Amino acid sequence: MNIKTASNGTMVVYGIPNCDTTQKAVKWLQKNKLAFSFHDYKLQGITKEKLQQWCDAKGVDTIFNKRSTTWRELTAAEQEKAATVNGAIRLMQQHNSIIKRPIIESNGTIIVGYNEKELEKQLQ
């Protein structure tokens, strides 16, 4: 699946600025002098279409973070909604802290989470 990057072809890092894992990825990208734009879920939200692209490319279990504090704070009834891809996408839009982060899009590829070896392989 080809993922669309920013219209200018720039790498896009999706995340939350105060997330430790996102901060590590941003620092790694800066250290390696790789240009990127940052998409803050808290300020900018996330579209259903983008979440669907990611779920199609990597699987909903990779994108949806069931280890998050936000997930554990949901009621059992809310958690049941994540049983389907559409339900999980709706939950991710409502509670964007449940989205695994960071998600990095570059040149038609998607990298989920922070892994230096994966970043080196995909981006350099």
Image: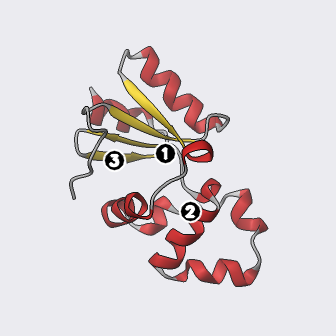
The reply to whether the C-beta atoms of the residues labelled 2 and 1 are less than 8 Å apart is: no
Callout count: 3
Mark 3 vs mark 1, foreground winner is 3
Q: Quadrant of the C terminus?
A: top left
Which badge, 3 or 2, comes first in the chain's sequence? 2
Residue drawn at (69%, 65%), measured in percent from left and top?
71
* Dot 3 amino acid type: Ile
Position of 36 compared to 74: left or right?
left
Which badge, 2 or 1, comes first in the chain's sequence? 2
- Label 1: how many Cα within 10 Å (few below 14, some 14–19, many 20+): some
Q: Secondary structure at mark 3?
A: strand
Residue drawn at (74%, 82%), measured in percent from left and top?
76
Percent position of residue 56, x then y: 32, 66
When the figure is inspected, residue 83 is found, relative to residue 68, above or below; the finding is: below
Q: Which residue is mark 3?
A: 110
Viewer-side residue, 112 vs 7 = 7
When the figure is inspected, residue 21 is found, relative to residue 74, above or below; the finding is: above
Q: Which residue is mark 2?
A: 93
Percent position of residue 24, x then y: 56, 29
Percent position of residue 60, x then y: 44, 68
